[in-house]
Amino acid sequence: MRNSNQCPKCSGVEILYLPELTDSERDKLAAYVGPPGWTSVPHFGIVTAYVCLGCGYTELYTADPRSIPYREVPGAKILKGTPQQPYR
Ligand SMILES: [Zn+2]
């Protein structure tokens, strides 16, 4: 949907792009937010969204995912797959 501007669920072609999402306190949603007590709490991996205006299907993407200090998140780890040849 991000590259095609077409919904994979209903084939709709009106896609709303939201460069950031916020919670009820207007904080940006992020994959990781630094510890409390900082003057300015750092956010890593700001979440963006593509929303189909036809059916509401939503894709979320994380900006700059390699910046996320995942080692500070209990249980977080990088899972590695085996590259597959594109289907022909
Ligand atoms: Zn749709």
Image: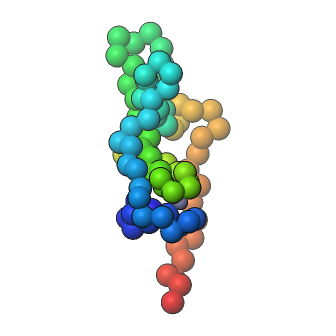
Front one among 38 and 2: 2
Position of 69 relative to 13 (above/below) = above
Look at the image and tell me whether residue 47 can be seen.
Answer: yes
Position of 28 relative to 10 (above/below) = above
Image quarter of residue 9:
bottom right
Task: Tell me what residue is drawn at x 60 percent, y 40 percent.
Answer: 76
Task: Tell me what residue is drawn at x 39 percent, y 12 percent.
Answer: 38
Position of 38 relative to 27 (above/below) = above
Image quarter of residue 57:
bottom right
Front one among 2 and 73: 2
Task: Tell me what residue is drawn at x 35 percent, y 42 percent.
Answer: 19
Image coordinates for residue 28, horizontal then vertical, percent: 42, 29
Task: Tell me what residue is drawn at x 35 percent, y 11 percent.
Answer: 39
Q: What colouring style does the render use?
A: rainbow
Front one among 79 and 46: 46
Q: Which quadrant is the N terminus positioned in?
A: bottom left
Image coordinates for residue 17, horizontal then vertical, percent: 38, 49
Image coordinates for residue 47, horizontal then vertical, percent: 44, 41
Image coordinates for residue 70, horizontal then vertical, percent: 51, 38
Position of 4 relative to 45 (above/below) = below
Look at the image and tell me whether residue 67 can be seen.
Answer: no
